[in-house]
Amino acid sequence: MQVLLVEDQPQLAQRMAQGLSEAGFAVEVAANGMAAQRFVESSVYDLVILDVMLPGLNAWTLQQAIRQQGDTPLLFLTTPGGIEDRLRGLELHEDDYLLKPFDDKALVARVKKLLRRERGR
C-alpha cells in the first residue's frame, strides 16, 4: 500500500514514516504542500496523511487537488485546539482526523481502518 505523508516537522515525519514502514506500508514523505502536490500529480496513493498546518500550499488547497484526482482517503493531522480546522475539514469531506500528539500505534491503526473502509466501498 502506497502512503503519502505530508508533514513539515522532520523528526515527526521520520518517526511516522518509520512506524508506517514497519507496519508494511510504502511511504513517501513531503515536507510542504508544494512538494505534496508534485507527488500527487505524479503518483497514485492508497492514502494521504496530511498535516493541516503546512508551509507553502495550504492543506485545504491540497485537499481539493487530491479530490479532483479521485477519492483517495485522507487522514488529517491537527492540534487539539484546532476545532475550526476540524469543522472546515468535515465541510470539505475529509475522511478522518488524528490529534497531535499521538502514539505511533494509533496512527497505524487509523491508517488500517481507513484502508479497510475504502476497500469495503
Image: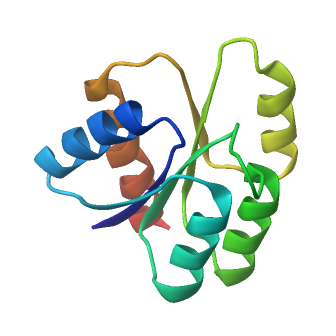
The answer to whether any part of residue 70 appears in the image is: yes
Query: Percent x, y for residue 87?
Result: 85, 32
State the image quarter where residue 22 is shown. Answer: top left
Q: Which colour scheme is used?
A: rainbow
Label total for image: 0
Q: Which residue is drawn at 21% across and 38% down?
A: 19
Which percent across, then down, holds residue 43? 46, 83
In the displayed structure, does residue 13 sit left or right of residue 17?
A: right
Q: Which residue sits at x=41%, y=68%?
A: 46
Quadrant in which residue 40 is drawn: bottom right
Which residue is at the far bottom?
Answer: 42
Can the viewer see residue 93?
no
Residue at (39% x, 31% y) in the render: 12
User: In what quadrant of the picture does the N terminus appear?
Assistant: bottom left
Residue 117 lies left or right of residue 27; in this view the side is right
Q: Position of residue 86 (x, y in %)?
A: 77, 31
Give residue 11's position: percent from left, percent from top: 36, 32
Q: Does residue 114 lie above or below 37 as drawn?
A: above
Look at 81% across and 20% down and name the residue there.
83
**Residue 5 vs residue 44, the one in the foreground:** 5
* Residue that sits furthest to the top in the current view: 81
Q: In this view, does 17 lie above or below 102?
A: below
Asked if residue 58 lies left or right of residue 119, the reply is right
